[in-house]
Structures are given as structure tokens and as C-alpha cells.
Image: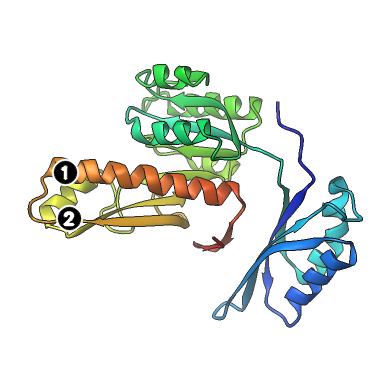
Amino acid sequence: MTAAADPSKAVLLLSCPDRVGLVARIANFIYERGGNILDLNEHVDVEEHHFFLRVSWSLEHFSIPAADLESAFTPLAREFRANWQIRLSGKRNRMAIFVSKYDHCLREILWRHSLGEFDIDIPLVVSNHADLAPLAEAHGIPFHVIAVTAETKAEAERRQMALCDEHGIDTIVLARYMQVLSPEFTGRWPGRIINIHHSFLPAFVGGNPYRQAYRRGVKLIGATSHYVSDELDEGPIIEQDIIRISHRDTLDDLVRKGRDLERIVLARALRLHCEHRILLNGRKTVVFD
């Protein structure tokens, strides 16, 4: 069951064509109705002449009920020709985690979730293998095994989508899920499927990136978390990090260091997403952290 929304704070994410007075108009909308701005960040893409804003404000003395916020802001948003959304602080993100056999990213998410670090609910873990069932079950989370082969892929995705719909999933996290999703699947959750890629994109795409990096004698390896799009590993990037490598490092060292980066980078991306700090800008992101 979805937790009831806590009306103590609202967050507006907005993007629109740039024009004079946008910040003042939006701040005035909040001020005139008794809201107290807690945080405000804005950015202008000067090449595209596009404006991006994230603002959060207290609803303690706000004159508009939380349930009526969207309808109250709609006329201003239409005037600005804006893409926008308003999120309430107590509306917990319902997240499905997809995994295969690698456990490090799943362990990181479940550990942080157990500490209350993420404002999320995890109703289910989905996998194409049974290996990580004990880990999910140890955290009291149902684990669903849906095998995937070339012949059964379409039916497997239909079952996965049905499960996500049944549980009211807002966000899907590919925590080293080693399957490529179809355009039909990604189109159901645009900007709401988060992947961790075990390399510093766009370099070393595809399989065995650590072996590729090792053979090239790289001095840095990295990890990339991004939103999933129809183009493999080409979705808007949310978060990245790197670590230095020397000639002393073996392939096993690269894999070990890479695992550490993957779990941390994915955790950062989930926090940014769940705190509504990301706006999409075509193939890029604007991240207000």
C-alpha cells in the first residue's frame, strides 16, 4: 500500500523556453499563497534557450490544499509552455529492482534501504535467475524469478510489466540486470528506469568492459548510472565516478574496484532520482544536488 502523502513540503520540477521573469513569477506564486521557499535552484541552457528549475517550499501555512496544487499551478505552467511536475515530500517512490546473478548493487540498495536512507518502498525484486532469492527474502522482499531466453523474451517482459503494474511501481532499477529491455518495455516507464553500467560511458560499451580496459592499459576506470532509453547504453547520464588504476593492478583488481564504483554510483543516482533533483534535457540531464 502506498504511504499517505505528507503535506509538509512540495517540490516543483519545471523546464520551459527561457524568458525574463520566470523565477520571480514562480516565487511569487508560492509567496502569495503563504508558502516559504526552502530551496531553489535554476539553470539556463544558453544554447537551447531553455530554462530549468527545482524549488521546494513548506506547505505549513500554504493556502492551497496539497491535493489542489497541480490544478492551481496549471495556468502558469501553460503560460510558460512548461514540462513540469509537483511532488509531495511524503509520497514514497515504489521501486522494483531487477537483477541477474551479481549481488553487489542489490546488497547496497537493500542495506541503505534498511537504514532508511532512501524514501522508497521496494515491493519486489525480479530476476532471470534464482541465485539472489535468499538475499531479497532476508530483507522481507518478495523475489520473482522470470526466466528469459530468446524464445521467451516477449512473454517474460509481459509478465514483468504485469507485476510492476500490479504493485504500482514508479521506478525500475536495473541493478546489474543482464538483459536488454525492449522499446515496448522502456516506453512504459520513460525517465523512470535507472541502469548502472560497468564502465565510464561512452567508452568501453558492451560486454566485458574491464577486460577491454585491462587490455588497453587504462589508468582510470569508471561507472555510469543513466536512464534507460531505446538506444542501448545511450540514455541520459545521471551520475558517474572514476578510480585510478596502475600497472600493478590485475584484471581481478579492476573488477573489484569496479564493483565498488558501481554500487556507490548507483546509490547516488537513486538518491537524486528519489529526491526529485533531476530534469531531463534531451539526451542530457540537469542535476540539482
Residue 145 seen in this snapshot? no
Q: Which residue is mark 2?
A: 245
Measuring from the top left, give residue 64's x and y in whole percent.
90, 53
Is disc 1 surrounded by few (<14), some (14 to 19) or many (20+) residues within 10 Å?
Answer: some
Q: What's under tag 2, amino acid-wise? A: Ile
Quadrant that contains the C terminus: bottom right
82 left or right, relative to 279: right
Indicate the secondary structure of the residue bearing disc 1: helix
Q: Earlier in the sequence, mark 1 or mark 2?
A: 2
Quick one: which residue is furthest to the left in this view? Answer: 248
Residue 136: quarter of image? top left
Q: Residue at x 45, y 18 (%)?
A: 138
Indicate the secondary structure of the residue bearing disc 2: loop
Q: Residue at x 74, y 75 (%)?
A: 22
Is 175 drawn above or below residue 153 in the view shown? below
Residue 148: quarter of image? top left
The residue lying toward the viewer, choosing from 116 and 244, is 116
98 left or right, relative to 198: right
Q: What's under tag 1, amino acid-wise? A: Asp
Measuring from the top left, give residue 167's x and y in whole percent.
64, 26
Whether pointer 1 and pointer 2 mark residues with C-beta atoms closer than 8 Å, the reply is yes
60 left or right, relative to 217: right
Q: Which mark is residue 106?
A: none
Q: CA distance from mark 1 to mark 2?
A: 9 Å
Residue 240 seen in this snapshot? yes
Measuring from the top left, give residue 53's x and y in whole percent.
66, 67
Quick one: which residue is furthest to the bottom in this view? Answer: 20
Q: How is the image coloured?
A: rainbow
Residue 76: quarter of image? bottom right
Measuring from the top left, give residue 1's x and y in whole percent.
70, 25
Q: Which residue is mark 1?
A: 253
